Image (cartoon, rainbow, N blue to C red):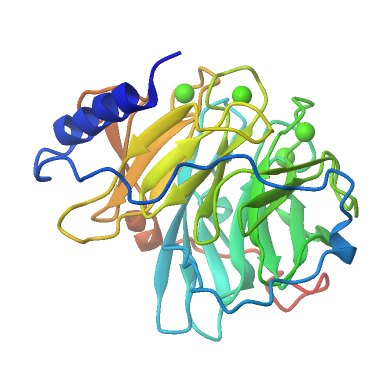
Amino acid sequence: MILARDRRFLVCCATLLAFSTWPACAPEPSTDPPTTGDADPSATLADTPAPTEPTPEPTNPQSPTTAGDRVICLAGDWDGDGTDEVAAVVARESEPLTWFFPGLEPIEERKLSFGLATDQPIVGDWNGDGMDSPGIFREGGWHLLLERKNVESTNIFPFGLPTDFPAVGDWNDDGVDTPGIFRDGVWHLIDSLAKEEADHSFGFGDTGDLPVAGDWDGDGKDSVGVDRKRFFYLRHDLSSGNGDIELDYRSPDGSDHPVLFGDWNGDGLDTPGLVRDGKVSIRDDFEQGPATRAIACHALTDQSPTATPEQGADDEGGV
Ligand SMILES: [Ca+2]
Ligand SMILES: [Ca+2]
Ligand SMILES: [Ca+2]
Ligand SMILES: [Ca+2]
């Protein structure tokens, strides 16, 4: 096992090499790494009280806000070729979320209205056909578009609370992505859609962290991680414990660049990509070195499909 401190040093160096304009490594995080929580494996989400303490609201850097337009970059395998690409989601106040997918043919396939600006857009392969499609998390409700082209295929069910943060993964390696929620350092994950009771509950992370999910070791199962102000702790197992991988993506200049995780090369391993200047600078591992390549995100919104899917956010399905 690589010592956490050594790992941190390697990754910090990797960050420096990959993004040479960044100053020296930032100091170690002032907070302790995620440790064992007190999750009750039998907890039923419906019975779990909402957090009552008005702790500082963690802010997802890619969450839509009502303050204005926002472009959110999301990783997904839109064409089923086994590698992830980046989609851009434009959140504009009082308008449907507009999704832009890269490279799909015909060009009409590249644009979709699904969700509202106040929703949290998510991505997953909800039906196990090898292609990811959109979803949104809205006030504790999941709206999952099983077929990207068909808004009528939306599967809607509750899981979690409005104050929860959503995460998506194939937790059991059955080829289907399913929901999870992160609540004040405790995770609740389900292995099939529309379940009320969690299949996996455990503590990992703290209040104020943001959840991430991916297959960090290539074993076919997604697992979890937390984003602590761009210092990431990734864990291989769905259990409490310390992070197996630590990544430092803090930017000492104070800028707050989002980080995505995706399988950019189809090797089964989900690795980071830094969103900056409208592009996603990716790596195919967690080690040092320059970015493998940059993938366009914001530029996708410049494409001008000649038509959009007829059904939008106000159509049947409530999305
Ligand atoms: Ca699918
Ligand atoms: Ca699964
Ligand atoms: Ca894994
Ligand atoms: Ca990969």
Residue 75 seen? no
Residue at 42% across, 52% down:
228
In which of the image's four quarters is ligand 2 placed?
top right
Q: Quadrant of residue 212?
A: top right
Count of numbered marks? 0
Q: Position of residue 57 (x, y in %)?
A: 51, 73
Q: Position of residue 237 (x, y in %)?
A: 65, 27
Vertical arrangement, residue 11 with respect to residue 227, above or below: above
Q: Quadrant of residue 246?
A: top left
Residue 190 seen? yes
Q: Foreground: 144 or 304?
A: 144
Residue at 50% across, 63% down:
306
Q: Foreground: 172 or 80?
A: 172
Q: Position of residue 192 (x, y in %)?
A: 86, 42
Residue farthest along the top direction in this orientation: 1
Q: Position of residue 298 (x, y in %)?
A: 34, 57
Quadrant of the snapshot with the C terminus? bottom right
Q: Quadrant of residue 288?
A: top left
Vertical arrangement, residue 14 with respect to residue 47, above or below: above
Residue at 70% across, 40% down:
125
Vertical arrangement, residue 250 with respect to residue 224, above or below: below
Left or right: 24 as drawn, with respect to 222: left
Left or right: 114 as drawn, with respect to 85: right
Q: Foreground: 249 or 273?
A: 249
